[in-house]
Image: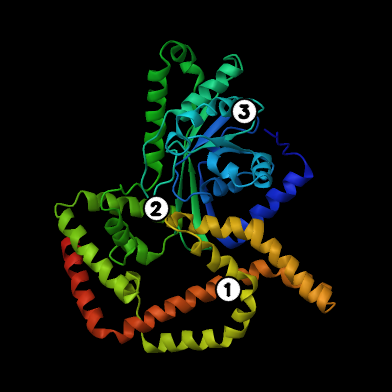
């Protein structure tokens, strides 16, 4: 497997480009809590985190850290078989294949021994190593079962250095303002690291017991930092959390404050004596609002025809600029989600990966070919390409504003259905006892 040298200028240029696209198109604002808990560069450690949003999870963590840090990570083994060129790229940026019984079968698991050796070598180099102990992403704000694979890899790295140096595991958790919207806020929380050196002797006598104990510690620490709504009744609970029935959603708090408020809301909801009745009513309410294609947060806004008319005028004035911005963003934003057959959690991962690696470079070449070769407008073509990032943000903002204005129009023109929805909302509000 190809070794990666993070000090080469090629690696830094590629990482800088990928980070630029991520920071300007995917993430609106990045929050980090507990950076002081992260071991210093040069120490040997693993980073563990909850896994919700496919490729965006490792990317957002890697891009939070200094550009000079080279973070290696595990990736599902099947992505290494797309084609030889892509496999070389994955190896080059520091990804290592993880073989899983459910995908590659029992025979594939034997290849993990080779991966463990490579991981030990890189951790002891030392490069930080990122692992998601759930072994697969969830479908929302809840935590899955942790496997002992992370602690097994960590002790394997300690054994590889002769049990001389301390290997640490850092529990972390991340939180998204929205999984599916672009230009959304992202929060990464870093807990206190767990030092494995005190466990070295016990591990060599009772390895399985020690690995289970540390795995439980890691999971408890991660769960305490994140929003864990639980998988049961998830859609109804998450709908209520994002609705105007949750005051935190109305107040539009900064993401760290919103996280704490949402954790409190979900905790009170789970403990409510009429929990099942609330869930049933919330399911009905969500279905009615989905049928009308509106968001519940509209009930907290003072909507009127003057606002809708003003927004429409602004949209009409900016329409020519939006049409201009659709090259190449209409393809970058709209095409990738249409390639997803089942798992919608891949939405923004597809958007980002396809845009950064394929669509942006392809459309840049097309722009240079049409304007440069065809018309001789080389400088104009280059200037347009450099403006794609701010233009892309405007393009997404216009689309969101258009969508919100359409929802407001339906809200104001569907008085009968809105009255039925309001009655149902009032029933839930009374049960929740909101003032």
Q: Which of 263 and 103 is in front in this view?
A: 103
- Number of other residues with Cα within 10 Å of mark 1, as a class: few under 14, some 14 to 19, many 20 or more: many
Q: Do the residues labelled 1 and 2 touch (CB within 8 Å)?
A: no
The answer to whether residue 435 of the structure is visible from this angle is no
Q: Which of marks 3 and 1 is nearer the N terminus?
A: 3
Q: Which quarter of the image is occupied by the C terminus?
A: bottom left
Residue plotted at (78% across, 70% down)? 368
3D distance between C-alphas at marks 1 and 2: 28 Å
Residue at the disc numbered 2 = 259
**Mark 1 or mark 2: whose residue is earlier in sequence:** 2
- Image coordinates for residue 252, horizontal then vertical, percent: 41, 64
- Mark nearest the camera among 1 and 2 is 1
Pick whichever, 109 or 250, lies toward us: 109
Color scheme of the displayed model: rainbow
Q: In this view, does 154 lie above or below 325?
A: above
Which structural element holds mark 2? helix
Is residue 31 shown left or right of residue 370? Answer: left
On screen, residue 172 above or below 308: above
> How far, Cα to Cα, is label 3 from label 1?
43 Å
Looking at the rendered image, the quarter that the N terminus falls into is top right
**Callout 2: few (<14), some (14-19), or many (20+) C-alpha neighbours within 10 Å?**
many
The percent position of residue 49, horizontal first and vertical second, equals: 47, 40
Q: Residue 395 carries which label?
A: 1
Q: Kindly indicate the quadrant of the structure image that contains residue 117.
A: top right
In three-dimensional space, the C-alpha distance between marks 2 and 3, rounded to whole angstroms, equals 37 Å
């Amino acid at each position: 497997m190809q070794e990666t040298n993070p000090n080469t200028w090629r690696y830094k240029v590629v990482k800088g480009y990928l980070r630029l696209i991520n920071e300007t198109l995917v993430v609106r604002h990045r929050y980090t809590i507990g950076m002081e808990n992260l071991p210093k560069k040069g120490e040997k450690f693993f980073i563990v985190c909850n896994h919700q949003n496919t490729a965006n999870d490792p990317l957002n963590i890697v891009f939070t850290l200094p550009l000079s840090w080279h973070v290696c990570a595990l990736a599902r083994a099947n992505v290494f078989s797309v084609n030889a060129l892509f496999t070389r790229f994955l190896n080059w940026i520091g990804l290592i294949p993880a073989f899983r019984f459910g995908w590659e079968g029992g025979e594939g698991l034997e290849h993990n021994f080779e991966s463990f050796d490579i991981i030990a070598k890189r951790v002891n180099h030392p490069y930080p190593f990122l692992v998601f102990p759930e072994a697969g992403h969830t479908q929302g704000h809840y935590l899955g079962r942790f496997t002992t694979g992370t602690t097994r890899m960590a002790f394997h790295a300690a054994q590889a250095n002769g049990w001389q140096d301390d290997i640490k595991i850092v529990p972390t958790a991340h939180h998204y303002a929205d999984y599916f919207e672009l230009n959304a806020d992202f929060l990464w929380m870093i807990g206190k690291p767990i030092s494995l050196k005190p466990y070295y002797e016990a591990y060599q006598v009772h390895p399985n017991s020690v690995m289970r104990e540390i795995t439980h510690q890691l999971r408890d620490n991660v769960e305490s930092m994140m929003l864990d709504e639980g998988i049961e009744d998830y859609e109804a609970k998450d709908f209520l959390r994002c609705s105007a029935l949750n005051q935190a959603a109305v107040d539009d708090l900064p993401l760290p404050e919103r996280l704490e408020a949402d954790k409190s809301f979900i905790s009170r909801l789970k403990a409510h004596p009429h929990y099942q009745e609330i869930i049933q009513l919330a399911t009905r309410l969500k279905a009615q609002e989905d049928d009308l294609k509106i968001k519940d947060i509209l009930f907290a806004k003072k909507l009127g025809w003057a606002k809708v008319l003003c927004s429409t005028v602004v949209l009409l004035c900016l329409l020519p600029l939006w049409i201009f911005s659709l090259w190449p963003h209409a393809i970058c934003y709209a095409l990738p989600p249409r390639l997803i057959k089942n798992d919608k959690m891949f939405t923004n991962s597809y958007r980002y990966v396809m845009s950064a690696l394929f669509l942006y470079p392809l459309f840049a070449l097309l722009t240079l070919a049409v304007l440069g070769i065809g018309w001789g407008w080389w400088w104009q073509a280059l200037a347009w390409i450099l403006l794609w990032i701010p233009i892309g943000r405007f393009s997404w903002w216009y689309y969101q504003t258009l969508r919100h204005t359409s929802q407001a129009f339906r809200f104001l023109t569907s008085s009968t259905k809105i009255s039925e929805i309001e009655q149902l909302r009032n029933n839930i509000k009374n049960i929740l006892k909101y003032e």
